[in-house]
Every structure is written in structure tokens, then in C-alpha cells.
Amino acid sequence: MAQYRVGRLEQEVQREVNDILLKRVRDPRVQGGVTVTGVEVTGDLQQATIYYSILSDKAGEGQKTAAGLEKATGLIRKELGSRLSIYKTPELKFVRDESVQYGDNIDRLINEMNRKD
């Protein structure tokens, strides 16, 4: 039962945070190109780790986006609280999902190898 609830909440949080980032967050460091790739909520529903990816692979962009998300966390959490029907809105922590970038890098390397053959 609790596992089902956590999974459902994770999906809802992911959908809502994507929507909030798109429509409510006005910070230019966060606008355009931030995608929530996954959410992990603790069993007690107190904390949510939000994994995100960005289109740019420049180091400076990653830091700017992280700072923008950090600054917007309060707004996002407040907005989530009004959208979700749960007793207490979890604390939010944003973590960059490197797997998307890693996958892109692998694709690039494979394409380079194929060109050399």
C-alpha cells in the first residue's frame, strides 16, 4: 500500500514540477531546457529528490541552472503544496541527472567510430 502511494506521489511530483518550471518559474537560469527526469520520495514522504537534465553540456550552464533551481525551490515547494492533496509537502532537493549526458556522449562516440570505418 505505502509503496503504491510513494510511486504515485513520485509521478505526480514529476509532472507538477515540470509544469511549474515551465509556467511559474521566471528565473532565466532555469527557463528553457530543464527537464525533470525522475523523482524519488522517501518512504515517510518527507523528502523528495528531483533529478533533472539540461540541454547544455557547458559546465557554467550546469552551475547557473543549479543555482536557479536552488533559488526557486521555495516557490516550487509552495506551488506543489497547493497542487497536491497531501498533508505535508516534502522537502525538495534537486540533483542533476548525468545519465542523459552520459548517453549522449556514448551516442557521439559510437557515431565517430562508425564514421572512421
Image (cartoon, helix red, strand yellow):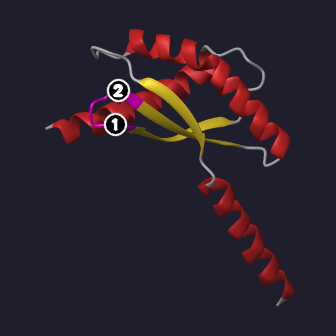
The reply to whether residue 58 is in sight is yes
Across and down, in percent, residue 2 comes to: 18, 36
Q: Is residue 46 magenta?
A: yes
Q: Amino acid at mark 2?
A: Gln
Residue that appears at 60% across and 23% down: 21
The residue stretch that appears in magenta = 41-47
Q: Main secondary structure of the magenta part?
A: loop
How far apart in space, not on screen, are marks 1 and 2 (Cα)?
6 Å
Query: In which quadrant of the rendered view does residue 24 lie?
Result: top right
Is residue 74 magenta-colored? no
The correct choice, above or below, for 67 with respect to 78 in the image is below
SS at circle 2: loop
Q: Are marks 1 and 2 in contact (CB under 8 Å)?
A: yes
Query: Is residue 82 left or right of 107 when viewed as pictured?
Result: left
Q: Residue 112: x percent and y percent?
A: 82, 77
Q: Position of residue 1 (x, y in %)?
A: 13, 38
- Residue extending farthest bottom: 117
Q: Residues within 10 Å of mark 2 (few under 14, many from 20)?
A: few
- Graded by Cα atoms within 10 Å as few (under 14), some (14 to 19) or many (20 or more), the crowding at tag 1 reads few
Residue drawn at point x = 64 percent, y = 24 percent: 70
Residue under the image location 70 percent in, 68 percent down: 107
The type of residue carrying mark 1 is Thr
Q: Answer with the quarter of the image where residue 95 lies.
A: top right
- Name the mark on residue 42: 1
- What residue is pinned by disc 2? 46
Q: Nearer the viewer, residue 56 or 41?
A: 41
| 115 or 76, nearer to the observer | 76
Q: Residue 7 has which mark?
A: none
Quarter of the figure with the C terminus: bottom right
